[in-house]
Amino acid sequence: MTDIQPLKITLPPLQITLDNGQQVSLQWLPPSPLNESSQTSQHPQHPQPPQLPDGWKKWIAANKFINQSDDTLIECMVKNGIDVKLAVEEVTGIANQPYFQAGQEILQKLQKLESLLQIQHQLAGLSSQSNSIPRIPFLSQAEFLDQYYSQNKPVILTDIMKNWQAMERWTPEYFKEKYGQVSIQVQGNRNADPNYEINIEQHRKTMLFEDYIDWVVRAGETNDYYMVANNNTLNREEMRGLFDDMEIFPEYLDSAQKLGKTFFWFGSAGTVTPLHHDTINIFLAQVSGRKLIKMIPPEQTPFIYNNIGVFSPIDPANPDYNRYPLYRNVRSIDVILHPGEVIFLPVGWWHYVKALEISISVSFINFKFPNDYDWKNPSFGHY
């Protein structure tokens, strides 16, 4: 008679056995190495290929846009620790990327505009007046509008401040006597920050005007503290008496719009407004002290390294040509603005300003002519 084998039913992890005596036994099964690894065996894990950091991808695109050779880029990447295969794939493959192709189309349009600016720059250099700004006693409203304002050309008017009582009154002593107890704002600790103009909000300081006046008188030549347009001194009710000492140039300016559009500058010798352009037209009237102004026409913008807003990182008084080689192409126009003179700073013109003595100035933007423009300023860089 054949032996009857026990009935075994396996339901992992449990095994049920029914023997000849109809006895049921239960047994827990140990984990099976095969079962544990079955999923892994069926779906083997492969190491991910190395990924190039986004910073390198941006660097490749930027250099391809300026026509750097593939070999040069690959060599640089390998020297900096990038796998040679990865470097070759990224550099040679970028031209097929739709994002890069779209960037090339935009770049070609930009290059067309830059070529027009460079042609204007070359032609301007042929003029015998390309290195000077005319000094004229007075212009009628029509002459100023037709010859300078509408033509985006600077001019210095030498005889339009003769009715300003400020020319005699405005001294540190006068300010201290009339306004010394007024709480004012200045820009402070500028020497500690090379980007003090960009970071202007971080440098606002509040003090009594008399304390600031004392500091200016004893400071000597320094750029550490300066009362600038953004301190809005003339917007303060207590300081509006200063308007009584000026004439708001009725030929060119709208006196009804003076509040909020007239700005007061006061500082020691050595105060600097770094290289920038304004987004509107400006009159700068010099009351006391002399100022050096370096002017650069807007068609030279491609040489200025303008990566943030209206600013340039270049110090025109000591340019770093190794870091900013395109600046060698710049032709600046240097002028000294004397007390009693007014310079017209046209919209878009780059300028750098340094006080040669204790200096008092007033600037105006309330022209009788349109003075509002739509700007597209860059915001991709950092200094």
Image (cartoon, rainbow, N blue to C red):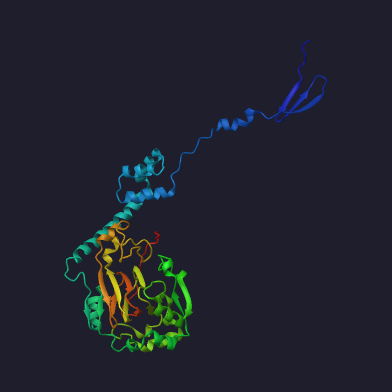
**Residue at x 34%, y 84% (from the top left corner):** 254
> Residue 124 occupies which quadrant of the picture?
bottom left
Expressed as whole percent of the image width and height from the top left, the position of residue 164 reads: 32, 88
> Residue 281 occupies which quadrant of the picture?
bottom left
Task: Indicate whether 7 appears above or below 247.
Answer: above
Q: Quadrant of the N terminus?
A: top right
Q: Quadrant of the C terminus?
A: bottom left
Expressed as whole percent of the image width and height from the top left, the position of residue 266 reads: 38, 79
Front residue of 195/91: it is 195
Residue 113 in sight: no
> Residue 247 occupies which quadrant of the picture?
bottom left
Task: Indicate whether 123 appears above or below 291.
Answer: above
Tally of numbered discs: 0
**Residue at x 25%, y 85% (from the top left corner):** 159
Task: Indicate whether 50 appears above or below 63.
Answer: above
Expressed as whole percent of the image width and height from the top left, the position of residue 317 reads: 30, 66
Task: Indicate whether 16 appears above or below 344.
Answer: above
Residue 193 in sight: yes
Expressed as whole percent of the image width and height from the top left, the position of residue 168 reads: 33, 88
Farthest-out residue, top = 1
